[in-house]
Amino acid sequence: MITPTTLFKCLADETRLRCVVLLHKEGRLCVCELTHALDLLQPKISRHLAQLRQSNLLLDSREGQWVYYQINPELPAWAFEILDIAVKQFATHSKQQKDSDRLKAMGSRLEIAKDCR
């Protein structure tokens, strides 16, 4: 189970925070979608996602060549309350707006996912 200290350490890094905010808003995203939305290189995103997964904040699932991530639905209620607040407060941040805009502008996510192979 995640502890408050672990959760706050996860959210203390801007890249991890941006990933968690998008995942909390969208529900489930593949690495390619996060890479595109955050406009960062795949190895950097994957490294941060691995840390979030190891802390039990995220779950991953493999579908063919793609790895999808989502917020762990078994997090305690207090953790979801913190994530809800973080999403709400971070929504006005310019980087978050750009992340969301890039994700929306992807068009067909299936087409982008084909490029991830």
Image (cartoon, rainbow, N blue to C red):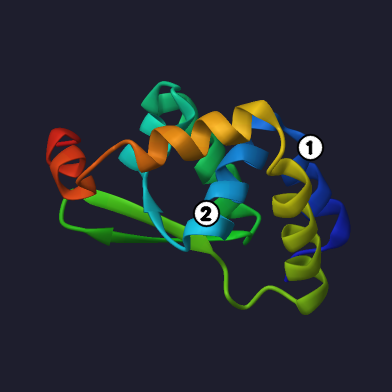
Q: Is residue 16 left or right of residue 82?
A: left
What is the secondary structure assignment of the residue under circle 2?
helix
Residue 67 in the image: state x and y as whole percent.
31, 51
Q: Is residue 115 above or below residue 70?
A: above
Q: Residue at x 62, y 61 (%)?
A: 56
Q: Residue at x 72, y 32 (%)?
A: 13
The quarter of the picture where residue 80 lies is bottom right
Residue matched to label 1: 12
For the residue pair 51 and 11, the one nearer the viewer reads as: 11
Image quadrant occupied by the N terminus = bottom right
Q: Is residue 23 left or right of residue 34?
A: right
What is the secondary structure assignment of the residue under circle 1?
helix
The number of discs equals 2
Residue 108 in the image: state x and y as whole percent.
19, 46
Q: Is residue 108 left or right of residue 5?
A: left
Q: Residues within 10 Å of mark 2 (few under 14, many from 20)?
A: some
Residue matched to label 2: 23
Q: Residue at x 77, y 78 (%)?
A: 77
**Of the residues shown, which amino acid type is indicated by label 1?**
Ala
Image quadrant occupied by the C terminus = top left
